[in-house]
Amino acid sequence: MMKWQGFYLSEHTTAMREWREAELLPVIHDELTPEEKFLLLSQSMLNQFALVLRIKPGRISDEVTGIVRELLNQDEIMIEVSKNNFRRLEVMNIISIKKADSWQTDDFQGMN
């Protein structure tokens, strides 16, 4: 067995496989209450900062990054995912919300 940067190659391969499988598994429960969701979405809209929203079924590929432009009603939002590209989302399908890192917001520079 070969050793590579402190890992045995088989351990590294196993760890990478487990990490990938964990990222592909869907999150099956909401991490936020409806009140917390509304507060964070409202703050994004008022302060014009980008969010990363994880949408059901909750895999990494089910993330939307953008700025909330409008709270359409209690159940839906309009989010700008790139300049002049909007997407309507149902709030009940949002599992988690976090503030986007600066590298994730390059498409939003100068949009405010």
Image: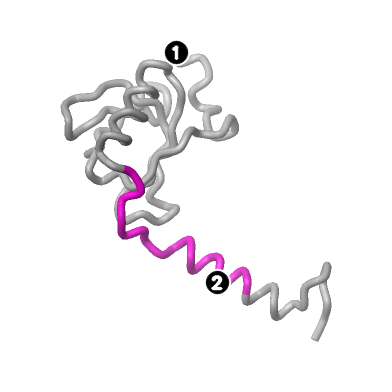
Question: Mark 1: which amino acid?
Answer: Asn
Q: Nearer the viewer, residue 37 or 83?
A: 37
- Estimate how packed mark 1 is, as few (under 14), some (14 to 19) or many (20 or more) residues with alpha carbons within 10 Å: few
| Rendered residue at 28%/30% (across/down) | 38
Q: Is residue 26 magenta?
A: yes
Q: Is residue 14 magenta?
A: no
Question: Disc count in the image?
Answer: 2
Snapshot colouring:
one colour
Residue 33 in the image: above or below residue 60: above
Question: Mark 2: which amino acid?
Answer: Glu
Q: Secondary structure at mark 2?
A: helix
Q: Position of residue 39 (x, y in %)?
A: 32, 28
Q: Which residue is mark 2?
A: 18
Q: Position of residue 108 (x, y in %)?
A: 49, 23
Marks 1 and 2, Cα distance to the nearest angstrom?
40 Å
Please give the label number shown on residue 112. Answer: 1
| Rendered residue at 41%/65% (across/down) | 25
Q: Position of residue 98 (x, y in %)?
A: 45, 38
Q: Which residues are magenta?
A: 15-32
Q: Position of residue 60 (x, y in %)?
A: 44, 53
The earlier-in-sequence mark between 1 and 2 is 2
Residue 65 in the image: above or below residue 95: above
- Estimate how packed mark 2 is, as few (under 14), some (14 to 19) or many (20 or more) residues with alpha carbons within 10 Å: few
Quadrant placement of the N terminus: bottom right
